[in-house]
Amino acid sequence: MAEYLLKERLKPKADWTVCSAGLCAGYGMQASRSAVKVMANRKIDITEHRSRQLDHDLVNEASVLIVMTAGHSDAILSRFPEAHGKVYLLKSFDTKAGSGDIVDPVGSTTHIYEGICVEIEKALPGLISFIKALKK
């Protein structure tokens, strides 16, 4: 959801690429029905989304890697030492929340997905400001 929410806020003027990849994601899996429903309520179609694994090429191409949990950050830095200095916790960009994890809602109800989506949305303005500052 985070990938598509960020893309929606950036279009059409973004001069960077946004993509998502997981540490344990199966390759080519569709978004869950709950995620599709929550995003459709926001007029964002994610039915074409397919999962993929984070790999060395993606890490090396990325200016920043935004993660949902501290555990994700630790795992990325363990597997990809070249990611040092690029990994940031998404919730840290929500000035009211400070930091913390955004829980993976996989297997949860649509209501839980909705709550996670709201958490993501709250962090996006700060993330966008951060990324724009990097481009200067």
Image (cartoon, rainbow, N blue to C red):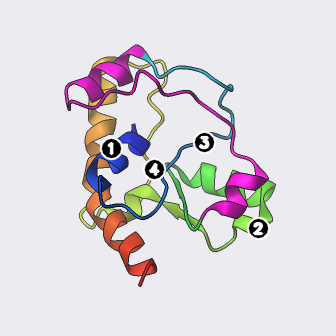
Q: Which residue is mark 4?
A: 101
* Mark pair 1, 3: CA separation: 15 Å
Q: Residue at x 44, y 78 (%)?
A: 135
- In the displayed structure, does residue 115 sit left or right of residue 104? left
Label 4 or label 1, whichever comes before in sequence order: 1
SS under mark 3 = loop
Q: Residue at x 25, y 24 (%)?
A: 40
- In the displayed structure, does residue 25 sit left or right of residue 124? right
Q: Which residue is mark 3?
A: 21
Residue 31 position within the rendered picture, expressed as x and y whole percent measured from the top left: 47, 23
Image quadrant of residue 114? top left
Q: Which residues are magenta?
A: 33-62
Q: Badges 1 and 3: C-beta atoms under 8 Å apart?
A: no
* Mark pair 4, 2: CA separation: 23 Å
Residue 116 position within the rendered picture, expressed as x and y whole percent measured from the top left: 33, 37
Q: Residue at x 33, y 44 (%)?
A: 5
Q: Which of the image's four quarters has the C terminus? A: bottom left
**Mark 3 residue type:** Ala
**Mark 4 residue type:** Asp
**Residue 122 highlighted magenta (yes or no):** no
- In this rendering, is residue 26 above or below 74? above
In the picture, the disc for residue 121 is none
* Mark pair 2, 1: CA separation: 27 Å
Q: Which residue is mark 1?
A: 5
Q: Which residue is mark 2?
A: 82
- How many numbered marks are there? 4
Callout in the foreground (4, 1): 1
